Amino acid sequence: MKVLVVGGGGREHALCWAIAKSPKCKKLYCAPGNAGIAEVAECVDIGAEDVDAVLDFARKQAIDFVIVGPEAPLVAGLVDRLEEANIKAFGCSGKAAELEGSKGFMKDLCAKYDIPTADYQRFDEPDAAKEYIIRKGAPIVVKADGLAAGKGVILCHNQNEAFAAVDHMMSERVFGDAGDQIVVEEFMTGEEASFFALVDGKTALPLVSAQDHKAAYDGDKGPNTGGMGAYSPAPVVTPELTDRIMETIVKPTIDGMAKEGRPYKGILFVGLMIDENGPRVLEYNVRFGDPECQVLMMRMKSDALDALLAAAEGRLDKISLEWHDDAAMIVVMAAEGYPGHYEKGSEINGLDAAKAIDGVTVFHAGTKSDGNRVLANGGRVLGVTARAPSVADAQKLAYRGVDAIDWPQGFCRRDIGWRAIARK
Ligand code: AMP
Ligand code: GLY
């Protein structure tokens, strides 16, 4: 079959890498892709958010199956448009993507269907929000309702910070329309984990567990990023906890979405906070996590294309997923300065040496080719990924891969996986 993957980050490289191995995949395209993706797919110069151009390309090339990586085209209704044109697609509808696209919607859904999450209230004007903050006290969390490129959540340690966050979003409108409505919620403590399930509207199939590191620097210090590394399995998510997450969170979410007239299909990514009272929802995402997707694809033994097709075709009750027992770890190499200002265009060497290490795969997140050279072209640039019998072994191997790469303008954390390794 002819397959098109939409997106151009590390997540899409991992998806393309896994899908290209399927005997069913006769031709693989990626829009827009990157220098690493170009090794396994034909990259087409169409931005992931250009819904019209993606649709047009899919029609003209008679694509059989489109897999949408990032949230923005999902929120913009790409899957609805493809399905109207009778093109099969993996991902949720625009209406279902509200789960990620609106914090207010997601909180109300949890409240209505009794899904555990932080206490909250929604506001559309600053004074009421500030009164609530005074009443509840700090620490407290202020969230822009809409998509804000991962920056719309402000953890406030005192009342002044919380007031400033409200003003930042509602008066200064730093996130534009996304901050016209806000959610103010209880500050939760515990251990975070990323939980993923394939969903076909009715059936949900959990994937293996994963955990990422959001902070930019070692010791989980520094500013929040999209994720500086990840590993699977995440020991905090025991088999018993998986059952509990499925029963108390994933199933009621899927049932609730169906009842709301927004049946959910695609990948459901639940960001969890786990404490002694159990798991609670921090957020939902309607896409695979990045970099979690890379470790999941490294561990997936089943044919990834088959699994994604089963979700799109409503056949998840007929399949089961197989996984490698090995652990996987990804270490993200980012451009110096990320997540703040960084330069593009520096040259990366040593990629072949890293890839030559048995068990290591290098996923490209933000790269482009220039003749034979590979240049940095983003904040998060590479994901050096390893599979090995334990998280500790995968860590050793991943850092061997990192050390083989010659890129003076890049940096990475040196402690990815510390939490899992410390538990042993
Ligand atoms: P979100 O985009 O809602 O997941 O928020 C991004 C990050 O902010 C999460 O991964 C958490 O680390 C943190 N966070 C969000 N909401 C809360 C909360 N209610 N309590 C504590 N931390 C939070
Ligand atoms: N790594 C977390 C995310 O993709 O949002």
Image (spheres, rainbow, N blue to C red):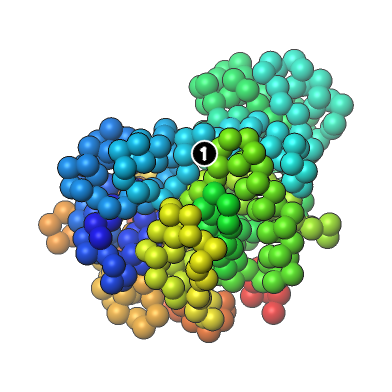
Q: Is residue 384 left or right of residue 199?
A: left
Can you give x and y, in whole percent of width and height, for residue 129 in the image?
Answer: 75, 22
Q: Position of residue 40 (x, y in %)?
A: 25, 64
Work out which residue is located at the far left of the displayed protein and give it. Answer: 371
Query: Image quarter for residue 159?
Result: top right
Q: Position of residue 109 (x, y in %)?
A: 69, 37
State the quadrant of the C terminus: bottom right
| Frontmost residue, 392 versus 75 | 75
On the rendered image, what quadrant is the N terminus found in?
bottom left
Asked which secondary structure carries label 1, the reply is: loop
Residue 49 visible, this orientation:
no
The structure residue drawn at horizontal position 59% and vertical position 71%, both measured from the top left corner, is: 233
Residue at (58, 56) in percent of width and height: 203
Q: Is residue 298 left or right of residue 139?
A: left
In front of the other: 1 or 290: 1
In the picture of the structure, the residue carrying the numbered disc 1 is: 97
| 47 up-or-down from 412: above or below | above
What's the amino acid at mark 1? Ala
Picture quadrant where residue 283 is located: top right
Q: Nearer the viewer, residue 297 or 114?
A: 114
In the image: residue 228, left or right of residue 341: right
Residue 223 in percent (x, y) is at 57, 46
- Is label 1's Cβ within 8 Å of ligand 2? no
